[in-house]
Image: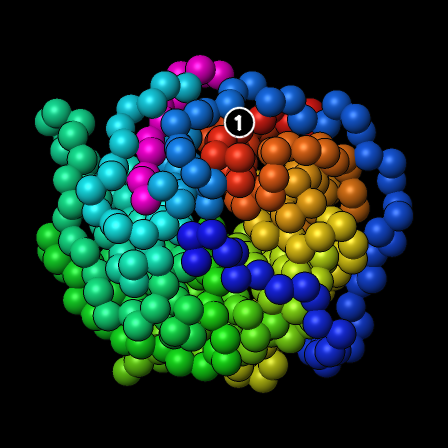
Amino acid sequence: LTAAKNRRTPSPRRVTIMAAAVMQVDDRASTPTPQIARCIAALEGHEERVWHCAWSRDGTQLASCGSDRTVRLWRRNGDTFVSSATLDDAHDRTVRRVAWAPCGTLLAATSFDATCCVWRRSRQDDAWEILATLEGHENEVKGCAWNASASLLATCSRDKSVWLWEFVDDEAFELLTVLHGHEGDVKTVDFDTCSSLSEDDLLVSCSYDDTLRVWGDDGDDWSCRCTLEGHTSTVWDASFCATSSGARRIVSCGADLSVRVWAEASVGDASKWVQLAVLENVHTRPVYSCAVSGNRIASCGADDALMLLSFDVESGALAKLGRVDACHAGDANAVRWNPACADMLATAGDDGVVRVWRVSF
């Protein structure tokens, strides 16, 4: 799997959309702005494709991972980046995803070797050490995410399951539960860390089975609160965001070339999720990654392009702002906004490079 991406073309099968009234956005609207983003840094060091990148909460550190089995750390000073560490002795296969804990001293990395390694940085000498290696998944571990308090770490796998790990006494991880429900690879997971309800842990997962699932703690155990249907092929990425009042939203993207917005709605005493808007043909090939920052969404995919969208978080309205063609010399696998710098984002690509961009609003 280090050579093959395990990706498929969109399926002709249609899935019933949950919401009766979904905003269909005209994908031809608005002419892209040529100078919408400017590359300010090309970070080289990985020897093979880079699968993912992630910023620390304070925006000063960028982590990347790839098929060369390493995690690389880059320290930011303004628009300047320097390599600060290479973590290369934990995995013997591709490292697929990285995720920072809110504290900035813990970093989780998942691998095709079926493990998730958690690294901890020493506050004394800035050195990194392996805190824990989490084992149990039967196949490649594709994604990971921390909750807002860093008390929980979620991992997901080709084995179709999501595992929840509890971080105990800042020293050890204990398996809390295993969540089943998806009928295909689980591509990624994300916790709500931004809404007014973020303390009430909610987790979204997306899958090769064309669906997203929202999971929550029912007191005794975790269960699936809702299955989100609307994508017509693999759902590659999803992330939470919130309205000004703190209400939850989810943005997702997939191999059907679309970006979709989902909203939490109350149905009696229960919570339900409905599709609020969809923008078709955002890319010309599968969309692998999407990220939200305020009223902007960035996406990238197999057409080697970076796309920027305007986003009304209240209504879900989407519109194309601009496109950067050939943002990488090959598939663009991941895009992430800097949480401390609203006009900065990073992308990771098959060309083995991590690129940092300044966006013009």
The image quadrant that residue 54 belongs to is top left
Mark 1 residue element? strand
Picture coordinates of residue 186, whole percent (x, y): 46, 68
Residues drawn in magenta: 69-80
The image quadrant that residue 156 belongs to is bottom left
Residue found at x 44% / y 25%: 44
Residue 248 as seen in the image, left or right of residue 130:
right
Residue 224 or residue 299, whichever sits in front: 299
Which residue is identified by label 1? 356
Is any atom of residue 101 visible in this view? no
161 relative to 315, above or below: below
The image quadrant that residue 263 belongs to is bottom right
Q: Residue furthest front?
A: 3
Residue 295 or residue 137, whichever sits in front: 137
Residue 152 or residue 209, whichever sits in front: 209
Picture coordinates of residue 8, whole percent (x, y): 62, 64
Picture coordinates of residue 108, whole percent (x, y): 29, 49
Picture coordinates of residue 219, whole percent (x, y): 31, 79
Residue found at x 52% / y 56%: 5
Disc 1 marks which amino acid? Val
15 relative to 185, above or below: below
61 relative to 67, above or below: above
Residue found at x 46% / y 60%: 188
Is any atom of residue 311 visible in this view? yes
The question of residue 215 being in magenta is answered with no
Q: Tag 1: Cα neighbours inside 10 Å, few (<14), some, or many (≥20)?
A: many
Residue 140 as seen in the image, left or right of residue 335:
left
* Quadrant including the N terminus: bottom left
Q: Main secondary structure of the magenta part?
A: strand
How many numbered discs?
Answer: 1
Residue 105 as seen in the image, left or right of residue 9:
left
